[in-house]
Amino acid sequence: MSVLPLSSSQRQQHEVSYSSSNSTVTPEQPGDPEILGKQAEEPQKKNDAPSVPPEGGRQGWLVVLGGFLCIFCSFGFLNAIGVFQTTYENTTLSSYSPSDIAWIFAVQLALMWAPGPLFGRIIDTYGPAPVLYPCTLLCIFSLCMTSLCDQYYQIFLAQGLGFGIGAGGVFTAAIICVGQWFVKKRGLATGVATVGGSLGGVIFPIFFDRVQKLVGFNGAIRYTALLIGILLLASCLLVKARLPRKQWDPSTKWFNFGLFREKQFAFYTSGIFFAMWGLWAPFDYLPGMAQANGFSPTLSLYLISIINATSIPGRILPPHLGDKIGHFNVVTVCAFLIGGSMLCLWLPFTYHPSHAGIVVFALVYGFVSGALVSLMMPCVAKTGSIETIGQRFGTFQLVISIATLTGLPIMGAILDRQQGDFVGLELFAAVSVLVGCVFLTVSTKVLGKMRNTWKI
């Protein structure tokens, strides 16, 4: 019940009817202003609490569409890092080691996650606009500057730092806003949105390869910037927050490391840390490995598209299954399959090179890696309340950024140390993911005991 202001005619009718039944009004009666004030405050307090998400609706799925475009332009572009790694090794940065070049993409990936605490808190308070709009402009500007670069430090600043920060803001805004509109269908909604990353990983390598043959490397980057700019401008119109704006709370901590006192959050974050440590190895090094074993340059680059093509169903079907049997259960199995595919399908390719074998690995790896990436954030949301979803995402993203920052350079250094032999790199990636699987298994059991159900 709420107390609404009355018009003059309504007020007169109210006074006449009220005076006919009560000649006097005592403080305890409902006509007392203090009582009315208290009644008016109660619904206001209820309105301040977050309402239950609508689980879809037109606006909710429009936000998913906007999130799809955001992730297409951010994660989708980053999924094509193998194209740039191979291109830079053979052209502009041929005098640098694979490990040195990998630092560009490691920083880029880390900045997808590291600013999460800042971006998450701003989005929690003011909505996505203060993050999404400037980061959109930064992505476009950074790619335009990359097209003018011919030195390592210039590429590092433009493509590594500039685009990394911009893509991180775009990605965070998309994931948080999609998560606010769904609870029961959050896995499916997030999976649909993250398909943008897979589709981008399919399109960008092919788009870049075709356009580069027509207008050169720098021209291809400019056309890529144009495509990303158009799509991100459309996403700015679609991505909206469900929860109302709040006043900035200066007492709120930027990093809530107290979350690690919660066992389910601590084990889960540790598991994803190790999984992400090795996850990006095929994305970055598979094209170079294929070329070293006789693949044509075009077919080698298209392996990235194959990985991302099969990750499209991987980002939809397992998350949808997770809505029924538990997201934690599915993500744990996917981590095990990622490590297993590296050991059973990728490692043998080093000793017995085969076009069919490496394509089969790309198909299998793409599906299970896509599932893990799409389920990471819904699982974070399940470890706490929706009111702190931004802060929880932010703390998680900060930890994951360390894994993405160090994983690729470590594997590049292993490759240098072994003088082009990929065995050490493959073993490091596979063992890291399998160690992560162990931590994910523990977190699933802890959360299952807390909630007395196996559907976690």
Image (cartoon, rainbow, N blue to C red):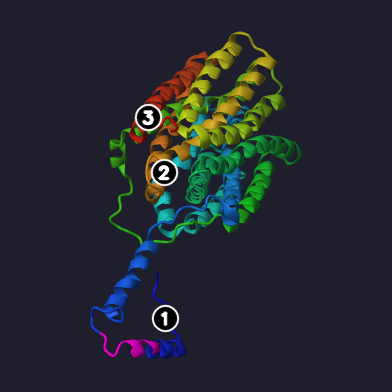
Can residue 200 be seen by looking at this rendering?
yes
Q: Position of residue 405 (x, y in %)?
A: 44, 33
Amino acid at dot 2: Phe
Q: Are marks 2 and 1 in contact (CB under 8 Å)?
A: no
Q: Is residue 234 left or right of residue 52?
A: right
Report, in whole angstroms, how far the alpha carbon at label 1 lies from the one at label 3: 53 Å
Could you tell me which residue is drawn at 50 percent across and 36 percent down?
A: 375
Question: Could you tell me which secondary element the residue under label 2 belongs to?
Answer: helix
Circle 1 crowding by C-alpha within 10 Å: few under 14, some 14–19, many from 20: few
Q: Which residue is mark 1?
A: 5
Residue closest to the eye, 65 or 449: 449
Could you tell me which residue is drawn at 43 percent across and 83 percent down?
A: 6
Report, in whole angstroms, how far the alpha carbon at label 2 lies from the one at label 1: 42 Å
Circle 3 crowding by C-alpha within 10 Å: few under 14, some 14–19, many from 20: many
Amino acid at dot 1: Pro
Q: Which residue is mark 2?
A: 393
Give the vertical position of 34 relative to 18 (above or below): above
Residue closest to the eye, 301 or 13: 13
Question: Could you tell me which secondary element the residue under label 1 belongs to?
Answer: loop
First of labels 2, 3 by sequence position? 2
Magenta range is: 17-25
Q: Which residue is mark 3?
A: 443
Can residue 150 be seen by looking at this rendering?
no
Quarter in which the C terminus is drawn? top left
Dot in front, 2 or 3: 3
